Image (tube, grey):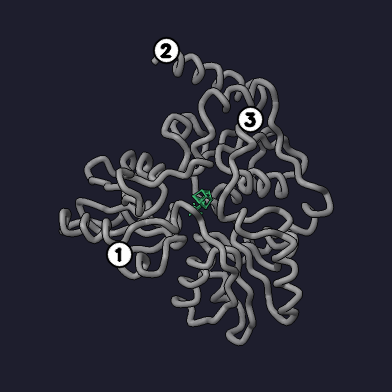
Amino acid sequence: NPETDALREEIMRLKKDKNALIMAHYYQRDEIQEIADFIGDSLALARQAAKTDADVIVMCGVNFMGETAKILCPDKTVLLPDTEAGCSLADSCDPVKFEQFVKEHPDHTVISYVNTSAAVKALTDIVVTSGNARKIVDKLPEDEKIIFGPDRNLGEYINCVTGRSMLLWDGACHVHDRFSLEKIDELKREHPEAKVLVHPECRRPLQLIADKVGSTAALLDFARSDDAPEYIVVTESGILFEMRRQCPEKKFIPAPPDEPGCMCNECDYMKRNTLRKVYEALRDGKPEVTVDAEIAEKALRPIVRMLEMSE
Ligand code: 13P
Ligand code: SF4
């Protein structure tokens, strides 16, 4: 449509003028993934932010992704097209309550999922993403006592695959925590050749029926290298755009949530960003992500530790 074309052209022009890099998570709207310079999972977005020489980063994702980029690149301008793009999982971990939990377990190493506020990261020893959590936990001594927050489903998954008994914070993502096992079983009966791809933020029974459990990037890699003709995708449906682009000959079926009439799961926070908001952010140089200097300094250490340990 002509309006979209005009916005795209303007975005391309402004991007050059301002030496800006547009980064997008796989859950972003298709039209944003189309214009992004870089698309990735949370780990890849953090890695890319750490190494870019752009002056401006437009983070098309949610707040914690913008904060992580800003903490890694304090001298760069980091723009988040919509400041209301939060995360229910990050919100399920209040920093004051988390600090209390940490204090109650003084001999524990604190591991936090990247889906947390900067204030929670500042209380953390090592940050992880779903793409490196297993690898990082495996590198710690076997008898190390660990607190893991805030996602209980990812925590349970890591406990199962590593044989650890990390203490888990009781948080969850409103998108991943509501997939319906019954509806996925039904889809499996309708599509007997389909393999099931599950994000580890989903509940344990869903992890157990998966052919592959992994981060968005890991699920995409699996679909690309595997030979099944069909996949039932149990994560936010934005990932289907890149899956279909990379594997046009395969069929990807979004898994439905446990809600009548609803066919696929969308993260309303991720979908707050639009092409127009990306254009306006580039044009106006705002909304800019800011992180309190003291918190940023404390939060940087566990993020750098993550990047080092996941090499
Ligand atoms: P990934 O790191 O797997 O991309 O997940 C990010 C996220 O927000 C999942 O809901
Ligand atoms: Fe947060 Fe869930 Fe949205 Fe991911 S899908 S950004 S975990 S609310």
Farthest front residue?
260
Q: Which element type, helix, strand or loop, lies under badge 3?
A: strand
Amino acid at dot 3: Ala
- Looking at the image, is 105 positioned above or below residue 10? below
Q: Report which quarter residue 12 is drawn in.
A: top right
- Mark 2 secondary-structure assignment: helix
User: Which of 274 and 39 lies nearest the eye of the viewer?
Assistant: 274
How crowded pointer 2 is (Cα within 10 Å; few <14, some 14-19, many 20+) is rated as: few
* Mark sitting on residue 20: 3
Q: Which residue matches tag 1?
A: 211
Q: Amino acid at mark 2?
A: Pro
> Quick one: 277 or 101, which is closer to the camera?
101
Nearer the viewer's eye, disc 3 or disc 2? 2
Closer to the N terminus: mark 3 or mark 1? 3
Could you tell me residue 110's position as x and y percent? 67, 71
Q: Amino acid at mark 1?
A: Asp
Question: CA–CA distance between discs 3 and 2?
Answer: 24 Å
In the rendered image of this protein, does residue 12 appear above or below residue 197? above
Q: Earlier in the sequence, mark 3 or mark 2?
A: 2
Answer whether labels 3 and 2 touch (C-beta < 8 Å): no
- Residue 291 is left or right of residue 172, and the answer is right
The quarter of the displayed image where residue 31 is located: top left
Q: In this figure, which residue is indicated by the disc labeled 2? A: 2
Secondary element under disc 1, as helix, strand or loop, is loop
Position in image of residue 138 (x %, y %): 54, 76
Q: Is residue 163 above or below residue 197?
A: below
Q: Do residues under tags 3 and 1 come within 8 Å of each other at their CB atoms?
A: no
Q: Nearer the viewer, residue 298 or 221?
A: 298
**Crowding near the residue tagged with mark 1, few <14, some 14–19, many ≥20 C-alpha atoms within 10 Å:** some
Label 3: how many residues lie within 10 Å, few (<14), some (14-19) or many (20+)? Answer: many
